Image (tube, rainbow, N blue to C red):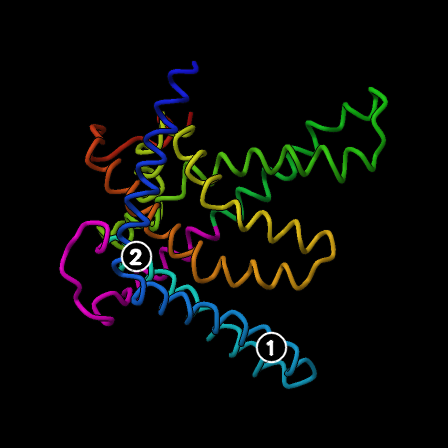
């Protein structure tokens, strides 16, 4: 077991080192997209407060515009990261802009993930209910045990489905087929991916902790670090992992959904 953990830790470290090397050579293009994401997110928050009492129709239009722009930029960032990780020649900004069908499939994938989260949330409540008869208080179950168990399950779901956008932008698959390939490709690689995610998401966790403990200045600083360092690193890291796993993938050309869930 120790040798297994040592092996996957080494592979995870290798992926992160390669990703950082790619990022250092192409930081301007990646950071530029991250800056646009940062501005879009913060501008939408500012306008939401500024237009709090304005016309409802205008607020809905702005919401749709910012959602469309934000997620389109995410796909542009992802496609750019894949091209850099492959070492291919860049095709200019417009070459990375997703098609309408790719955008719709990506959004539909987020809707599916949200639905899964809601189902898991309810199931965990049912599974935690017997704890009340074992002496646990309602507050302990509701605010500590239930969120912890739900978070663990959703982390597993996130790891297994995290690569579905790559199949949408790389191969033009629909959402369901992209989910199938993500499940098939990540089967047996959960621990490796978990170590990588924990390694690159540590600053984000620190930001949440600082905000929770009431240190807004520290939280803002970590937010900037996340926006211009961690998010670029994550984008390249996941692209490198995707390419490596695709090279090693020996599964079916049309993987079964049920056979790859567990």
In this view of the protein, which residue sits in the foreground, 262 or 249? 249
Give the CA distance from mark 2 to mark 1.
Answer: 32 Å
**Residue 62 in the image, given as x and y percentages of width and height:** 52, 78
Instruction: Say which element carries label 1.
Output: helix
Q: Which image quarter holds the N terminus?
A: top left
**Is 227 situated above or below 189?**
below
**Is 81 situated above or below 134?**
below
Please state the extent of the stretch shown in magenta in the rendering: 83-111
Q: Which residue carries the number 2 mark?
A: 24
Kindly identify the residue that appears in the image at 31 percent across and 36 percent down.
14
Does the magenta-highlighted stretch encompass residue 178?
no
Principal secondary structure, stretch drawn in magenta:
helix
**Residue 182 in the image, given as x and y percentages of width and height:** 34, 39
Q: Which residue carries the number 1 mark?
A: 46
**Residue reaching furthest bottom?**
54
Relative placement, left or right, of 176 versus 80 is right
Instruction: Say which element carries label 2.
Output: helix
- Label ID, residue 158: none
Q: Quadrant of residue 53?
A: bottom right
Q: Quadrant of residue 123?
A: top right
In this view of the protein, which residue sits in the foreground, 7 or 172? 7
Q: Quadrant of residue 189?
A: top left
**Residue 141 in the image, given as x and y percentages of width and height:** 77, 33
Reading the chain from its start, which is encountered first: label 2 or label 1? Answer: 2
Q: Nearer the viewer, mark 2 or mark 1?
A: 2
Kindly identify the residue that appears in the image at 72 percent across and 32 percent down.
145
Relative placement, left or right, of 96 versus 121 is left
Circle 2 Cα neighbour tier, 10 Å, few/some/many (<14 / 14–19 / ≥20): few
**Is 237 situated above or below 76?**
above
């Amino acid at each position: 077991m120790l040798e297994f953990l040592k092996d996957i830790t080494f592979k995870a470290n290798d992926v992160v080192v390669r990703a950082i090397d790619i990022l250092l050579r192409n930081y301007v293009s990646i950071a530029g997209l991250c800056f646009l994401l940062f501005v879009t997110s913060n501008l939408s928050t500012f306008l939401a407060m500024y237009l709090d009492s304005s016309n409802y129709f205008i607020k809905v239009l702005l919401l749709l515009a910012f959602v469309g722009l934000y997620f389109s930029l995410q796909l542009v960032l992802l496609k750019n990261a894949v091209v850099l990780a492959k070492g291919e020649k860049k095709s200019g900004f417009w070459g990375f802009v997703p098609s309408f069908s790719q955008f719709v499939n990506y959004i539909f994938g987020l809707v599916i993930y949200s639905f899964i989260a809601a189902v898991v949330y309810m199931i965990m409540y049912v599974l935690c209910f017997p704890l009340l008869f074992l002496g646990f208080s309602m507050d302990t179950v509701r605010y500590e045990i239930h969120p912890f168990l739900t978070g663990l399950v959703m982390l597993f779901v996130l790891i297994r489905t995290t690569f579905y956008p790559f199949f949408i932008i790389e191969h033009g698959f629909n959402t369901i087929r992209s989910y199938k390939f993500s499940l098939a490709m990540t089967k047996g690689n959960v621990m490796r991916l978990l170590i990588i995610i924990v390694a690159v998401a540590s600053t984000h966790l620190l930001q949440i902790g600082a905000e929770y403990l009431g240190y807004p200045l520290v939280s803002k600083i970590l937010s900037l670090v996340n926006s211009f360092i961690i998010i670029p690193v994550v984008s390249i890291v996941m692209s490198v992992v995707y390419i490596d796993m695709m090279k090693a993938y020996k599964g079916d050309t049309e993987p079964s959904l049920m056979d790859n869930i567990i």
